Amino acid sequence: MGLEGYGHLTALQLAREAIAGGVTMIQLREKNAPLRQVLTQGVQLRELCRELGVPFFVNDRVDVAILLDADGVHVGQDDIPGMEARKLLGDDKIIGISAGTMEEAEWAMENGADYLGVGPIYSTATKQDAGEAIGTALISAITQRWTVPVVGIGGINTENATVIIEAGAHGVAVVSAITKQHKPLLAAQTLARTVQTAWLS
Ligand code: TZP
Ligand code: MG
């Protein structure tokens, strides 16, 4: 999620509702705001996550993750490589890396990824440069090859989350399916239940 709210809810309220609905991780993904704002609002988000007991992650920026004492960072293929991020963050933090091809997944694994974010599974309006939707085949290929946790991302919602888990993903990451809904708590709850049901079957 970014730092912008939606409807009558602030980012902090959105996060609170998402967690109350069953979201198990919050990632701060802010591409536009000035860094000083990211740091001040980021502290508030981190505190909320600590209070409610869910890990708090920072997207792209290892420096911001360190300054916010985040639980982990999520880096793309063009960000600081996982190996370098590990040197800065130490062994206690979690490093997630994005992959959209098997080659990218191999590189992420060589770089010590703790989990992989795989996508965009479906087309998404949230990330302009996300590229073509790749479907679920890469999730299956990766989870057959490694035991690393895989999270599907991109255009995922309550309607299609089940097939992501059935393909082998351990979880799903969403932006609009929660933050752009008029009832974020309810949306998170429905999504969390859908994923939990898929885990059981
Ligand atoms: N990386 C690949 S797709 C994507 C990111 C950050 C956007 C996900 O947003 P949404 O709204 O869940 O499609
Ligand atoms: Mg990124």
Image (spheres, rainbow, N blue to C red):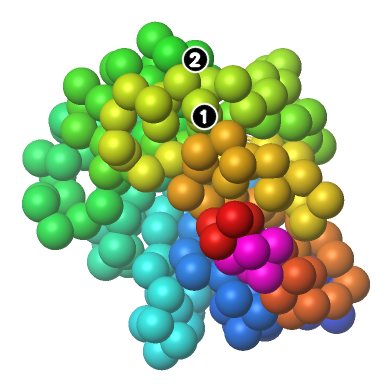
**Residue at the spot of label 1:** 139
- Local packing at callout 2 (Cα closer than 10 Å; few below 14, some 14-19, many 20+) is some
Chief SS of the magenta region: helix
| Front-most of residues 173 and 168 | 168
The reply, left or right, for residue 14 in relation to residue 77 is: right
In the image, is 148 to the left or to the right of 140? left
Task: Estimate the x, y position of residue 132 in percent, counting from the top left.
Answer: 72, 17
* Residue displayed at 58% across by 35% down: 167
Residue at position x 59%, y 65% from top? 196
> Residue 201, relative to residue 125: is it above or below?
below
Q: Kindly tell me whether mark 1's CB lies below 8 Å from ligand 1.
A: no
Q: CA distance from mark 1 to mark 2?
A: 10 Å
The three-letter code of the residue at mark 1 reads Ile
Percent coordinates x, y for residue 137 in the rendering: 59, 21
Q: Which mark is residue 55?
A: none
Element type where label 1 sits in the image: helix
- Tell me where residue 44 appears, x and y as whole percent: 47, 79
Answer whether residue 136 is visible to the viewer in this image.
yes
Is label 2 in a helix, a strand or a loop?
loop
Q: Earlier in the sequence, mark 1 or mark 2?
A: 2
Q: Position of residue 108 (x, y in %)?
A: 31, 25
Q: Is residue 60 visible?
A: no
Query: Image point 82% across, 61% down: which residue?
Result: 180
In magenta, the rendered stretch is 192-197
Which kind of residue does numbered mark 2 sit on?
Answer: Thr
Q: Is mark 2 within 8 Å of ligand 1?
A: no
Residue 193 lies in magenta, yes or no?
yes
